[in-house]
Amino acid sequence: MNVIRVFDFFSGCGGTSSGLGQAGMEIAMGLDIDPDSADSFRANFPRSTFLLGDIREMDADVLSPLIGKRKSPLLFCGCAPCQPFSKQNRNQSAEDPRRDLLGEFSRFVERWLPEYVFIENVPGMQKVNGKSGPFHKFNQLLSRLGYSFASQVVPAMSFGVPQTRKRLVLLARLNGPISIPPATHGPSGKPYTTVRDAIGHLPPILAGGTHPSDMHHQSAELSELNLLRIAHTPEGGGRESWPEGLKLDCHRTHSGHSDVYGRLAWDKMASGLTTRCISYSNGRFGHPEQNRALSVRETALLQTFPDNYLFAGNLASRARQIGNAVPPAMSLAVGKHFLKEVRKRKA
C-alpha cells in the first residue's frame, strides 16, 4: 500500500502537515482562507497544492483533480480555528460563522470517505450545545459512515510539546479499529521538554531586534515603561515582583490573569501559546532572562516547528499563525500512530 496522502483543511501555516510529513506521509493539499497562512504553507510545502478560499463556498468535488484514481489511503485533517470555543475568547457568539466549520469539513468526509480522519481543537468543544453541537453531530456522521473513532483530551506535553496546554483529539478510521496514541513523554517515556530544551540555544537579541542570521528571530519593541517592568521581573516571575510605581491600577485590586507580563522559566514548560504569543502584555511571554518578549522563532520552537520553518506576513500575522497552529510534535505522534495501523493492516 502506498504512503498516506494528507489533505489538511484549515491548515493555517502548516503545523499539522509539518508533523505528518515528518512521520513519512505525503502532504497533498492545504486549504485555508488566510493569504499569509497560504504563503507560509506554500513556502514549506512547495510540492503540495494549496487551495486559498472559504471552505463554505467550496464544493467537495474541488478535490477531484487531486484525489484522482485514489491509489493511496487518504487522511483528512480538520483542525478548525479554536477561538469560537476557547475559554480565553470572551466574545463568543452563537452567530460566529466559524462555529460550524466542522460541519463544512463533514461535507468533504462524506463525499470522499478518507481512510483516516484527524481532528484537533480546544477542550470543551465537545461540550458545546450538547447533542446538537458540532462535535456530537460529527461523531454521528462518522458512525453512520462506518468509521471507528476515539477522542480524548490530551496534554500536549505528553507528546514533547514544551507547553502546559491540553487539546481535544479525535482520530477516526474507516473499516477498522483506532485508538489515541500513547504518550511519548512523561513518567513512562522521555523527559518532558522544557523551555530551555526548545529555545536555550538561540543567540540573544534586544527588544525590537532581529538576529542577522534568522529573520524570524525577531521580537516586538517594548515601551520604556515595559522595559522597566521586565527588568524588575525575575525568571519565571511576574508583576508581583514590581515596585509599586510600575504596577497598573487594574492589577492593584485584581489578582487574576497572573501570567500577564510574566517571564518564562528555563526548566519548566511554557503556558499555552496564543495568537499574541510575542506580546509581553498578553501572557507569560517574556523571555526567561533577556529583557524582551519572545521572538517569532522562539514561539515557533515552543510550538515544536522545525528551526528552519518559514512564516509569511508581518510580525503580528506570523505570531497569529504560530499561536493558531497544531503543534507539529502532536501531529507527528498522530502520524506515526496511523502509519502503525496501516502496517498492521498490510500484515
Image (tube, helix red, strand yellow):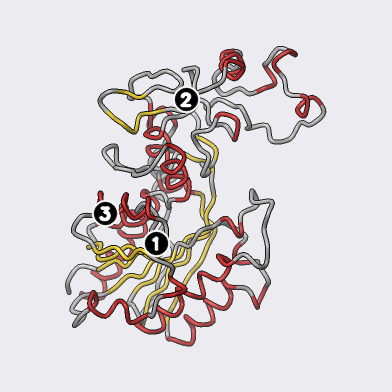
- The spot of residue 88 in percent (x, y) is 64, 48
Closer to the chain start, of discs 1 and 3, is 1
**Which residue in the rendered view is the most extreme toward the right?**
253
At 51% across and 49% down in the image, what residue appears?
A: 155
The amino acid marked with disc number 3 is Arg
Q: Residues within 10 Å of mark 3 (few under 14, many from 20)?
A: many
Front position in the image: 338 or 57: 57
Q: Residues within 10 Å of mark 2 (few under 14, many from 20)?
A: some
Distance of label 1 from label 3 (alpha carbons) = 12 Å
The amino acid marked with disc number 2 is Trp
Front position in the image: 238 or 309: 309
Element type at mark 2 = loop
Seen in the picture, residue 297 relative to 28 is either above or below; the reply is above
- The spot of residue 6 in percent (x, y) is 29, 66
Mark 3 highlights which residue?
A: 42
Contact (Cβ within 8 Å) of mark 2 with mark 1: no
Point out the image quarter for the C terminus: bottom left
Mark 1 highlights which residue?
A: 32
Point out the image quarter for the N terminus: bottom left
